[in-house]
Amino acid sequence: MNFLEEKILTDGVIKEGNILKVDSFLNHQIDIDIMRQMAYEFKRRFRGVEVNKILTIEASGIAIATLLGDLYDVPVVFAKKSETANSTDDKYISKAYSFTHKKMNNVFISKPYLNAEDKVLIVDDFLADGEAAHSLIDLVKQAGGRIAGIGIAIEKGQQKGGATLRSEGYQVESIAIIDSMDWETQTISFRPQAQKEISKTNLKSTHGINL
Ligand code: 5GP
C-alpha cells in the first residue's frame, strides 16, 4: 500500500452517494507532507516528459499543483469557476458538470496564462467521470498547447473518467485508484499498482528534503 492509500484508510470518510471525504488532509485542511510526497511521486511517474506549465482547477488541486510547480520550477495556473469583477482579460471558456455540486460550471482561464508553446501537466485532487479533466484539456487545446500528462491524487476507478482519458491516449497517473468503496461498512479497496513511489528515506537522501 502506498502513502496516499494508507492516509485514505486512516483519515478518509465514505459518504453515501459514492463520495469520499478527505477534508483532513486535502479538501479543507492541507497536509503539506502528503502534498510534497505526491509532488515527488508525480515527478517520478512523469520522468522524461517535457513540462513547462502545471494546470489545475480551483480549489483543491491548487495545493498539489503548487508543490509540483516548485519541483519543476515552472508556472502554476488554476482554472477558475466563477467570474471575478476585476478581470477584464479575454478568456478561454469551457464547461464542466460538477459531480460533487451536481451543477454545470463555466471554467475559464485568462488568455495570457495559456499559450501554444505550453506543454501542460494537468493535476487534480479527484478523478471521477472526467468532467473537470476534460474541461482543462479543452482549455489547453483552445490555446493551441499540448497535454504532457494528467496527474491525479485519487481516482475513483468505478467511474468512467480514468478509462475514457486513457483510451483517448493521455498518460494518466493516479496515486491511489479506488476500485470499490462501501459507506455502510466504511471499506475501500484499491487497484493494485507498482509500488515504486519515492519513500521518505529516498527523498531525504536524494533531495536533502527534511520530512
Ligand atoms: P469529475 O470531474 O472527474 O467527474 O470529478 C472530479 C471533481 O469532482 C474533482 O475536482 C473533485 O473536486 C470532485 N469529486 C468527485 N468525486 C469526489 C469525491 O468522492 N470526493 C471529493 N472530495 N471530491 C470529489
Image: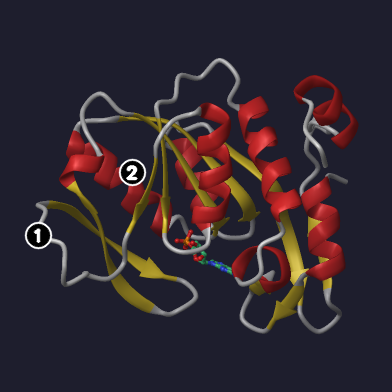
> On the image, which quarter does residue 88 sit in?
bottom left
Residue type, numbered disc 2: Ile
x then y, percent, for residue 85: 16, 72
Judging from the image, what secondary structure is the residue with disc 2 in?
Answer: helix
At x 49%, y 75%, the residue is 100
> On the image, which quarter does residue 2 sit in?
top right
Q: Is mark 1 within 8 Å of ligand 1?
A: no
Examine the rendered structure and indicate whether residue 141 appears above or below residue 126. above
x then y, percent, for residue 123: 50, 45
In the picture, the quarter occupied by the C terminus is top right
Instruction: Name the one closer to the observer, 176 or 181.
Output: 176
Q: Is residue 165 left or right of residue 4?
A: left
Q: Is residue 174 left or right of residue 195?
A: left
| Nearest-to-viewer mark from 1 and 2 | 1
x then y, percent, for residue 124: 52, 52
Judging from the image, what secondary structure is the residue with disc 1 in?
Answer: loop
Residue 67 - label: none
Instruction: Name the one closer to the observer, 165 or 112.
Output: 112
Q: Is residue 211 left or right of residue 133?
A: right
Mark 2 — residue? Answer: 137
Examine the rendered structure and indicate whether residue 174 appears above or below residue 105. above
Mark 1 — residue? Answer: 88
x then y, percent, for residue 210: 81, 37
Q: Is mark 2 within 8 Å of ligand 1?
A: no
Say which label, 1 or 2, has the lower sequence index. 1
- Is the residue marked by circle 1 packed among few (<14), some (14-19), or many (20+) residues within 10 Å? few
